[in-house]
Amino acid sequence: MDVKPDITHDATGTYCPIPITELAKVMKKVEVGTIVELLADDEGAIQDVPAWCQTTGNEFLGYKEEDGILHFYVRKTQG
């Protein structure tokens, strides 16, 4: 996966629902079209992030795991 994020937010060391609440806070502050990279180490986020995107209408671009850290990519599509 070769996505170039505009902003990275580190939510490692937190557990459900904190990575999602952190993502929601960041998404409120950025412009439509911005790609946010969320770093997390909670395995629950693998289901939570795409579900949150589906609920909010933002675009889930995918994720990768690197050295035990999950990198999620979300594009803001809603004003």
Image (spheres, grey):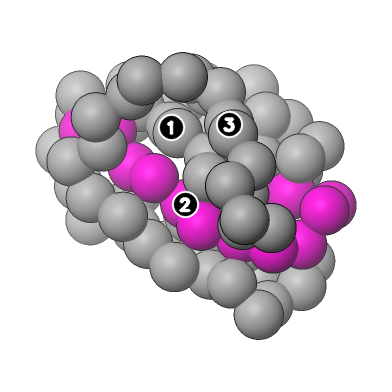
- Amino acid found under the numbered disc labelled 1: Val
Residue occupied by mark 3: 63
Mark 3 to mark 2 CA distance (whole Å): 9 Å
Residue sitting nearer the eye, 11 or 32: 11
- Choose top left, top right, bottom left or bottom right for residue 67: bottom right
Region of the chain picked out in magenta, as a range: 34-45
Q: Residue at x 43, y 32 (%)?
A: 74
- Amino acid found under the numbered disc labelled 2: Leu
Q: Upstream in the sequence, badge 2 or badge 1?
A: 2
- Amino acid found under the numbered disc labelled 3: Tyr
Q: Residue at x 46, y 19 (%)?
A: 1
Q: Nearer the viewer, mark 3 or mark 1?
A: 3
Q: Secondary structure at mark 2?
A: strand
The magenta stretch spans residue 25: no
Disc 3 crowd rating (10 Å Cα; few below 14, some 14-19, many 20+) is some
Tag 2 near tag 1, CB within 8 Å: yes
Disc 2 crowd rating (10 Å Cα; few below 14, some 14-19, many 20+) is many
Point out the image quarter for the C terminus.
Answer: top left
Mark 2 to mark 1 CA distance (whole Å): 8 Å
Task: Name the mark on residue 38.
Answer: 2
Q: Residue at x 24, y 29 (%)?
A: 4
Residue occupied by mark 1: 74
Q: Upstream in the sequence, badge 3 or badge 1?
A: 3
